[in-house]
Image (cartoon, coloured by chain):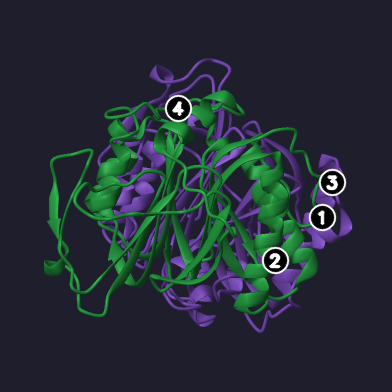
Chain colours: A green, B purple
C-alpha cells in the first residue's frame, strides 16, 4: 500500500517536520520504495517534485528538506508500485488545470476494472487506476460545471463521484486546488488539526521533536492528514470507512460521514490491502 | 528579455553542460534574475522544476546539476519579469495535458493586447501573455483534433496558429510533447545539431569544456536550441525571423521558413526587445 500525506493551513507552513517522518517510510522504516512525489501550492502556482528513487535516499527529497518551502496546501505520496509500471508518468501526485486552477490528486488503494470512457476534457497520460480516477472526477465536474461552483455544490458533487468510484475497490485519496483539500478513506486515513495552544510533537519514524509553539502564531491552524499517524504523543483522529472530509484554512468545513461510522483497525486495513493484491 | 533553452535528442542525454552555461545568465553573467524553470520529459512523464529565485544561486538549479537527469526533450526558461507578477504560477515552462500527453511551453517576447476568449478545454492559471498563448494554441488544436493528428497536419496547424499569434508582438517560443519540439523565432533563436564525429565544446558563460566524443555513441543526435549560442567554438545556426522549426529525434523534420529569410543581429534583437518594453 502506498502512503499519503496532506497539509491544509490558514497560513503558509513548513511541512518539513511531517515530511521527514513520512519520507523515512520510503525505504527506511517501511517498504514504500518505488518513488515518491510531493506538490506544494504557492498561491495559484504549484511546485511539484517527482522522483522514481525511494524517498529515504532521494536527492529530490533532500532538496525538499533543505528548501523549507512554505505552503498552505501540500499533497505527498510514497509509492509501492502495484498498478502500472514504475515510471515518472505514474508517479503521484497528478496535476491538471480545471476552471483556471491547478488541481493535485494522490491515491492509495486499488480500483478493479475501473476503465471509464475516454474523457473529452481530461485523459490519463500513464496507466494507473489512480490517474484514471482523477481524470474521471475532473471530467465529470468539468462537464457539469463550466466555472467552479460554490463550496457546497462542489462538495456534494465530489461526494457523489467518490461514492461511485469506491464501488470499484479501495479508494483512499486526497485532492486539492490550493484552497480546498478533500480527503477520503476506504481503509486508513488519519488527521490532526494543530492550533493554539501549540505543544510539542515527537515523530514516530525518527528521533525528532518539534515545539510548534516556537514556530507558529496564535492564529495558525494546520491540518495534517496521513495514512498512519506521524507523531506518537498527539491524538490523531481517524476518518471513518467511506468518510469524505473537506478542509479549508486548516478547518473541516464539510464532511460526509456514514450514518453508522466504522473505524478500521490498522491490522484490518493492512489485511484488506493485502487481500486486494495491494502490497503493504 | 527572458532566455530559452531546449534540447531534442534521439537518446536520453544529460543537459548539464548546456544548462550550466545557461543558468549563469540568471544573475551571474547576465541579468535574468526573476526565477527559472526547467522541464524534462522522461518517457511520457515530466519532471518539472520551477523556482522564483535566480537560477545562478538556486538550490533547485543545484539539484538539476547534481542529479544529471537524462532526457530526450527538455525546455528551460530564465525569466526577467515583464508581464505579470513574479510568482510561481507565472513561471515557465507551463504544462498541460492534451491527447493523453503532457505538453510543455516556454516563451520569450511580448504579445500586446492578446486576450483570446476563455477556452473550453484550456485556461491560464497565472496572468502572463505567455500562458495565454500556450492555452490558445492547445485550445485551437484540441477543438480541431480530438486525437493527435499526423505530423504534417499538426505542423501545419501550429504554423497557422503561430502566424496568427505573432501578429500581436514578439513570440519566440518552444513547445514539446516529449517527442516533438517546436521552436519559433520572432527575433533571436539559435540551434546546433551535434552528431558524429563529436568534438569538444567550450561554454561562453563559464570556463568549462566538454569532449562530447567521450560521452556519446556514434548514433547520437542532439539538437540544442537557445536564445543565444551557448558555446564559442562551434557553429550555431540561427532561426530566421518568423521561422518555425520542428525537431524530432535530434533532426529537423519540418520547417516553415519565410521566402526571403531575414536573420536578425543580436544588437537589433535586443533593441527590438527594449523598444517593445521587454527588459533585456
User: Furthest-bottom residue in view?
Assistant: B113
SS at badge 2: helix
Whole-angstrom CA distance, mark 4 to mark 2, is 31 Å
Chain at tag 2 = A
Say if labels 3 and 1 share a chain. Answer: no
Q: Give the distance between the C-alpha atoms of the residues marked 1 and 4, in whole angstroms.
A: 35 Å
Disc 1 crowd, CA 10 A, few/some/many (<14, 14-19, 20+)? some
Task: Determine which residue is flagged by label 4.
Answer: A280
Query: Which label sits in the foreground, 1 or 2?
Result: 2
Q: Do labels 4 and 3 share a chain?
A: no
Residues at marks 1 and 2, CA–CA distance in whole angstroms: 19 Å
Q: Distance between the residues labelled 4 and 3?
A: 38 Å
Q: Which of marks 1 and 4 is nearer the N terminus?
A: 1
Residue occupying image coordinates x 37% and y 37%: B17
Q: Residues within 10 Å of mark 2 (few under 14, many from 20)?
A: some
Using residue A74 as the reference point, say whether residue B108 is left or right of it: right
Q: Earlier in the sequence, mark 4 or mark 2?
A: 2
> Circle 1 is placed at which residue position?
A120
Foreground residue among A132 and B50:
A132
Q: Does the residue at mark 4 contact the one at mark 3 (Cβ under 8 Å)?
A: no
- Pinpoint the chain carrying mark 4: A
- Mark 4 closeness class: few <14, some 14–19, many ≥20 residues within 10 Å: some
Q: How far apart are marks 3 and 2 (CA)?
A: 29 Å
Q: What element carries label 3?
A: loop
Which of the pair A223/B124 is nearer the observer?
A223
Residue for badge 3: B147
Amino acid at each position: 500500500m502506498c502512503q499519503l500525506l496532506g497539509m491544509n493551513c490558514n497560513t503558509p507552513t513548513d511541512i518539513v517536520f511531517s515530511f521527514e517522518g513520512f519520507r523515512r517510510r520510503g525505504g527506511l522504516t517501511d517498504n514504500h520504495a518505488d518513488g515518491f512525489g510531493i506538490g506544494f501550492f504557492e498561491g495559484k502556482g504549484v511546485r511539484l517534485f517527482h522522483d522514481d528513487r525511494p524517498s529515504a535516499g532521494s536527492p529530490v527529497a533532500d532538496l525538499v528538506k533543505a528548501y523549507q518551502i512554505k505552503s498552505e496546501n501540500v499533497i505527498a505520496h510514497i509509492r509501492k508500485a502495484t498498478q502500472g509500471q514504475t515510471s515518472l508518468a505514474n508517479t503521484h501526485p497528478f496535476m491538471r488545470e480545471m476552471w483556471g486552477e491547478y488541481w493535485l490528486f494522490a491515491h492509495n488503494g486499488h480500483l478493479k476494472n475501473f476503465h471509464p470512457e475516454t474523457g473529452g476534457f481530461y485523459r490519463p497520460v500513464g496507466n494507473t487506476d489512480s490517474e484514471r480516477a482523477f481524470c474521471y472526477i475532473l471530467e465529470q465536474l468539468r462537464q457539469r460545471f463550466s466555472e467552479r461552483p460554490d463550496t457546497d455544490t462542489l462538495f456534494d458533487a465530489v461526494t457523489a463521484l467518490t461514492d461511485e468510484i469506491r464501488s470499484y475497490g479501495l479508494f483512499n485519496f486526497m485532492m486539492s486546488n490550493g484552497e480546498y483539500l478533500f480527503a477520503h478513506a476506504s481503509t486508513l486515513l488519519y488527521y490532526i488539526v494543530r492550533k493554539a495552544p501549540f505543544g510539542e510533537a515527537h515523530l514516530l519514524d525518527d528521533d525528532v521533536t518539534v515545539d510548534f509553539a516556537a514556530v507558529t502564531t496564535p492564529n495558525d491552524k494546520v491540518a495534517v492528514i496521513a495514512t498512519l499517524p506521524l507523531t506518537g504523543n498527539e491524538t490523531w483522529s481517524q476518518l471513518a470507512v467511506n468518510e469524505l472530509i473537506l478542509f479549508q484554512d486548516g478547518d473541516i468545513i464539510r464532511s460526509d460521514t456514514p450514518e453508522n461510522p466504522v473505524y478500521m483497525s490498522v491490522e484490518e486495513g493492512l489485511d484488506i490491502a493485502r487481500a486486494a493484491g495491494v502490497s503493504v
